[in-house]
Amino acid sequence: MNEKQLSAWRERLIALRDGWRHELRERADAIAQQVRSLESSGIPTHPADHDSEGVEKEVEIARSERAVYDQVQAALERINAGRFGTCEECGKEISQERLDAVPYASRCASCATSRGP
Ligand SMILES: [Zn+2]
């Protein structure tokens, strides 16, 4: 991968990261608000309770989104380290198609399918 391609990926990842950052902040605020309103409502927050279940789900979603954010961040670090586009598992080049679909992929398609994403 040449310098020009790398800087294009860097820009794309930064845009992705900043988008996530905004999204994560909004979601964290929404969750905090929901938790506050549940607490002030005086309704006991039992796991089976419908509202608290909604919050649990929100937290779960936020957690997986946070994981994507971390992966984007890691991909940017790989660009800086000169390892972007190379599979961390087998050292082969990650295909352009795969990077197009998952710009923060750290493994090639065959390693990801054999060992999970
Ligand atoms: Zn591989």
Image (cartoon, rainbow, N blue to C red):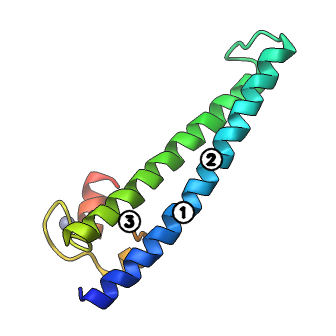
Question: Residue 52: which quarter of the image?
Answer: top right
Vertical order, 65 against 30 (above or below): below
Distance from disc 2 to disc 1, alpha carbons, whole Å, reads 11 Å
Between disc 1 and disc 3, the foreground one is 1
The disc labelled 3 sits on which kind of residue? Tyr
- Residue 108 lies left or right of residue 35; in this view the side is left
Looking at the rendering, the quadrant in which ligand 1 lies is: bottom left
- Residue 45 lies left or right of residue 85; in this view the side is right
Question: Residue at 79% of width from left, 21% of height from top?
Answer: 38
Callout 1: SS:
helix
Question: How many C-alpha atoms fall within 10 Å of the one at disc 1: few (<14), some, or many (≥20)?
Answer: few
Q: Which residue is mark 1?
A: 18
Q: Which mark is residue 94?
A: none
Question: Residue at 52% of width from left, 40% of height from top?
Answer: 63
The disc labelled 2 sits on which kind of residue? Arg
In the rendering, at what x and y percent does residue 9 appear? Answer: 38, 78
Question: Residue at 44% of width from left, 48% of height from top?
Answer: 67
Question: Residue 88: which quarter of the image?
Answer: bottom left
Q: Which residue is mark 2?
A: 25
In the rendering, at what x and y percent does residue 65 appear? Answer: 53, 49
Question: How many C-alpha atoms fall within 10 Å of the one at disc 2: few (<14), some, or many (≥20)?
Answer: few
Camera sees residue 39: yes
